[in-house]
Image (cartoon, helix red, strand yellow):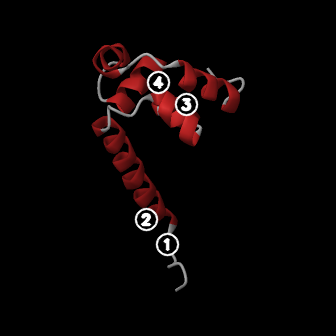
Amino acid sequence: MPTPEIDPATRTELEAAAFRRLVEHLRERTDVQNIDLMNLAGFCRNCLSKWYRGAAEEKGIPLADPDAREIIYGMPYKEWQAKHQKEANEAQKAQFAASNPGHG
């Protein structure tokens, strides 16, 4: 079955809906730590917030890093850290160092 033709405006709407669902899913899955995401997928919530901020800046919208993080996390980053972030274990840290050189 061929991929349906989708006009650019509809494509943008679909992409935005998928992005919103991804953010919602990550907000619900507070058990999934950022280091787990980085080790498995090569990106995390912080990456999403940086990409969001970059897209805003491309449109001439100044957006501070803490504000972008709050958009992704659904709360201030420090609050999310206090409520949900766990210390990474040595195996997670080693995997991160090996698979994400230069990141951090």
User: Disc 1 designates what residue?
Assistant: 6
Structural distance between the alpha carbons of marks 3 and 1? 27 Å
- Between 28 and 48, which is closer to the camera in this rendering? 28
Comes first in the chain, label 4 or label 2: 2
Structural distance between the alpha carbons of marks 4 and 2? 26 Å
- Mark 3 nearby-residue class (10 Å; few <14, some 14–19, many ≥20): few
Comes first in the chain, label 3 or label 2: 2
Image spot of residue 63 (x, y percent)? 47, 24
Comes first in the chain, label 3 or label 4: 3
Residue type (three-letter) at the residue carrying disc 3: Glu
Label placed on residue 57: 3
Label placed on residue 63: 4
Comes first in the chain, label 1 or label 4: 1
Image marks 3 and 4: residues in contact by CB distance under 8 Å: yes
In the rendered view, would you say 40 is above or below 83? below
- Mark 2 nearby-residue class (10 Å; few <14, some 14–19, many ≥20): few
Residue type (three-letter) at the residue carrying disc 4: Leu
Q: Is residue 59 visible?
A: no
Residue type (three-letter) at the residue carrying disc 2: Thr
User: Disc 2 designates what residue?
Assistant: 10
Q: Secondary structure at mark 3?
A: helix
In the rendered view, would you say 22 is above or below 6? above
Image marks 3 and 1: residues in contact by CB distance under 8 Å: no
Q: Secondary structure at mark 2?
A: helix
Structural distance between the alpha carbons of marks 3 and 2? 23 Å
- Between 17 and 102, which is closer to the camera in this rendering? 102
Residue at the image position 32 percent from the left and 32 percent from the top: 30
Comes first in the chain, label 3 or label 1: 1
